[in-house]
Amino acid sequence: MARESIDVGELIDERPIGSFHICVVAFAFVIITWDGYDITAIAYAAPELLKQWAIADRSALGPVFSASLVGILVGSPLLGFAGDRYGRRAASIGSLVVFGAFTLAAAWARSLDQMLILRALAGVGLGGLLPNMIAYTGEFAPRRYRATLIIVMFCGVTLGGAIPAAISVWLVPHYGWEVIFLIGGLMPLALAACAWLWLPESVKFLVVKGRRDEAAHVLRMMAADTDIGPHTVLVPPAEAVYASFNPKHLFAEGLAFITPLLWLCFAINVMGLNFLIAWMPTLLIGQKLLAQSDAAMVTSLVQIGGTIGGLAICRPMERRGFWPVALLFAGAVPFVALIGYAAATSVWLLIPAVTLAGFCILGLQFGLNAASAMIYPTSVRSNGSGWAFGVGRFGSILGPIFGGKLIALKLSVPMIFLIASSPFVAGALACIALAALYAAKFKGAGFGERSTAASLVREAV
């Protein structure tokens, strides 16, 4: 009897977006929201910590701001490996539990040293969540909408990043800075339980790993109109399949120079982004440019602008690859430089400056995040994203420390932001090189055509 075959990659890539996709992206969006929350939480707790712990030197907060980023540096490749080995679902649930537990514990910290340790441990969990959820969403998304769905999912980070601002204004005056970490710890733990009960595993991962029965069950959930019988052969996606992970796989299939350029762009951009997130509220309040509540709300405009920028870049990336990302890199230079001048001039100039800086910096970060999942095959996708996030964290660690050094030099706020804009010049040049190289290697294909443009059908051991 002839055995029917179903090409899983083709089935997923060619399907229209349906209710299953919407549920997957919505669930991932909610999970990612608390990643964004946790990253920015310490910045909004910082002004209260300075007062309650009688810390006169604001630059002493630099290591605390960077502590979770050190944890992310460890967690991204480590839990990225776990995602490719044990599954995106299992690695994501583990990430939620780790960063939820240590964020909750931070509510009982009573010194900078304790806070530093707890933030570093929470960062390990944070580091694993993004690469696995990005890979997870991308593996369920139809090819022509893959960048769009990944970026829509990732918009949860910007929403989450804005929530601590509201809490610092409405709840902290009544319940203290601890409430920021209580909320930020309990919600991820609740979501881990929900994910354990309801989140299905990536069907591409299951097929690549030979877990046929589980893959068939998820396919029936996703494609009820597809007949999958007991003798149906599920064919893996047409791409390179690696039996075990080796970092050299991230440089194969035409990616020898693309991967290191991607890492460089990650590092430069997250350096600038984390400088803004970590130091903007403290700088604006410390220089008496804005009241604490106003500074918190202005800083949240980075997230709002970033959400708009991320949504704006979706479709252009699917058609033009890295070129839209390079354009936003270039746009970040003048808008970041403008923030310091605007802060010293007028709040009405500061609002659009911060919003446009967020549009460029977070918008291009969304693009880089999506690219990190789309240019690697399924068997190393979480590793590919995890290593990009991990290497990028060298930049994010330097960002808050760099800001602390600038403050220690007693520079004016306009000068600090002018200097902070300079890394984006290097980032724009690196991204232009990346865009040109990607277009040459894959014949000008946008990310929506990446799977068919490259010759990826190979068995590797």
Image: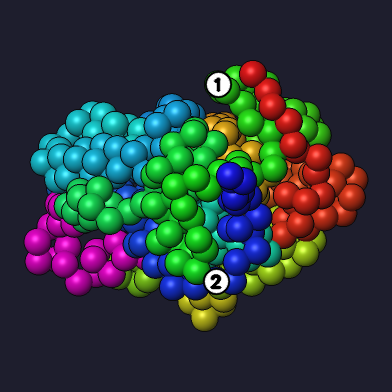
| SS at badge 1 | loop
Could you tell me what secondary structure mostly forms the magenta stretch?
Answer: helix
| SS at badge 2 | loop
Residue 244, numbered label: 1
The reply to whether the magenta stretch includes residue 327 is no
Q: Residue 208, percent across and down?
A: 54, 36
Q: Which quarter of the figure is the C terminus placed in?
A: top right
Q: Which quarter of the figure is the N terminus placed in?
A: top right
Q: How many residues crowd mark 2 within 10 Å: few (<14), some (14–19), many (20+)?
A: some
Magenta residues? 160-184
Residue drawn at 45 percent across, 67 percent down = 224
Q: Which residue is mark 2?
A: 17
- Relative vertical location of residue 295 with respect to residue 428 in this rendering, above or below: below
Measured in 3D between alpha carbons, the distance from the residue under mark 2 to the one under mark 1, in whole angstroms, is 32 Å
Could you say which quadrant of the image residue 333 lies in? bottom right
Residue drawn at 39 percent across, 67 percent down = 23
Q: Earlier in the sequence, mark 2 or mark 1?
A: 2
